[in-house]
Amino acid sequence: MSHRDLASPFDELKPVTRSPLEFQGFVPEERLKDYYLKGYYQPQTIAQFLQESLSKYADQPAAIGLTHQSQGEGSGSQEQKWTYKQLAAQAELAAQRLQSLGARKGDRVLLQLPNCLEFLSYMVGSFQLGLVPVFCLPKHRERELEHFARQVDPAIHIFAQGAENCDYWSLYRAYSQRMLAANLRPPLALDITEPGQGLEPQAGLPGCPDAEETADKCAKPWESVALFQLSGGTTGRSKMIPRTHMDYLYSVRESAHICQLSPQTKMLVVLPAAHNFTMSSPGILGVLYSGGTLIMAGDPSPQTAFGLIQRHGATMASLVPALARAWALLAERGGLSFPSLELVQVGGAKFSPSAARHLVEVLGVKLQQVFGMAEGLVNYTRLDDPLEIVLTTQGRPISPDDEILILDDQDKILPAGQAGHLLTRGPYTIGAYYREEKANRESFTDQGFYRTGDLVVAHPSGHLEVVGRAKDQINRAGEKISVDEIEDFALQLPAVQDAVAVGLPDPDVGERICLVLLAGDLKAFGPSPLDYVRRAYRQAGFATYKLPERVELLSQFPLTKVGKISRKELRERIGKIISSPQ
Ligand code: OOB
């Protein structure tokens, strides 16, 4: 297929001035100033932070991984190793491509790339131009992408056609057409697999501006938004999480110190690169800050990961519990050992003490539990914590100024040692979602504390143990799904009278989506209600991980005393239906 065939129908739309970024927070300004004065906030943008590493570690290996860009002799992915200097040159090339599409400082870009080397060059290039990346997942589909585009008005959508077997051009066209029909301006498309301008930055084209130039010179530097992370969402669709240069970099630097990263660190990047865990805890930015090497895993299978660890001597990896369990089982069965691997971080969902012990015993590595959230707060078990603490808790906060409240249902502080709702405020936790007035009133207190929706108990050492969840969310292998989003769509299906989505406990992925339906017309579902439902969600452009994996039809829903649907009883009832013989 030629470039022409793939060309976007919107190529003629040249980016014009996009809407400005707004900033709105509930954290009292005095506190933000205080964090600044305490030295948590350095007067530095992410571009300046990266620039320092790119020069300081110029000849050291920065990254190993697959690249999608055309290699002259035909394209396709192949493994390459980039030094920091090469990464800088590739970032410059990426910046040139972005600029040639008209991207300007302050513009948002949807960055939707798999774990390949270009993820790094386009991320660095975007920051260097003063663009604000929205860290999309490769698994996001047109429904999610359209929502992000409507929220942040991006100038460009960066993707790799064909990655993960997905036709990103057709997703792009579908949501862009809908936006145009609604009189909204879609972003331009940048498909990194299309031949660019060669492998070297071109003379004559503008290069990356000096990092100083793109730095925001605003009066309140702590308000300068660097990037958007995405929340799993509890009420409806994903919310956009504006992270500032200062807050994000503070968490990255501290995380790198806590995890003792160094130029010898070789981090295997298995989870999606864009996820907050992988990006900043200490993640990709932490490794680049420390002069270490990133090993980008092209696919998340344990087999690929094991091969990369052995070939390149990875020293650390970050996993979700589902993957950590799979690693431990496979390594045990195969009698495998990984002498280079020192540290395995596990986070994103609750890691049970027994699975934690098994991992440590089988892999002979140091385990670090990580309980974090894209909204900010990250807790780590420390590398010198006693084993029992590492196995049974999810760690303690990064900062002495992370405030932790554990409250009862009436927002009253609970006595020490009792489990309750976790609220938090601190130097790297957001004070508001982007353009979400209603959700903000629910998710933040007047004093700017974020309601995490997690139920925790604090140990005397200050370590938190996650004991449950109060938010309406399903956690499938670390991927968060808002039950509202699933239910809202089910209610639009003609055959459905009422719908409730529940997370069913699952030994492999933690939880699976079960959609419980009150059927208006049973026949409308055809022979397989599950097929009917999955088809409908797929056609509506939902990411695959959000498709229900089980459908139960009931004639009535159990109600609480006040007449609300009782999710608890529903879960129990469904549990019984599933465990009883057919
Ligand atoms: C990470 O970030 P998100 O935004 O995808 O999800 C945050 C939520 C938390 O509120 C909690 O419900 C759950 O994920 N979670 C955990 C957990 N880590 C996250 N629940 C139990 N145990 C854990 N260790 O998932 C994230 C962000 C940065 C670092 C690590 C994870």
Image: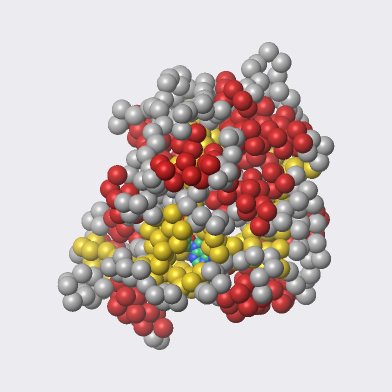
**Position of 247 relative to 406 (above/below):** above
Q: Dividing the picture into quarters, in which one does residue 21 lie? A: top left
**Residue 320 appears in the rendering:** no
Please give the name of the residue rendered at 29% of the width and 78% of the height, measured from the top-left corner.
569
In the orientation shown, which residue stands out farthest toward the bottom? 581
* Quarter of the N terminus within the rendering: top right
296 left or right of 413 in image: right
In the image, residue 45 lies at what x, y percent? 58, 34
**Position of 64 relative to 544 (above/below):** above
466 left or right of 303 in image: left
Q: Residue 141 or 202: which is nearer the viewer?
A: 202
Please give the name of the residue rendered at 56% of the width and 28% of the height, measured from the top-left corner.
215
**Position of 50 relative to 258 (above/below):** above
In the image, residue 552 lies at what x, y percent? 32, 71
**Position of 353 relative to 300 (above/below):** below
392 left or right of 170 in image: right
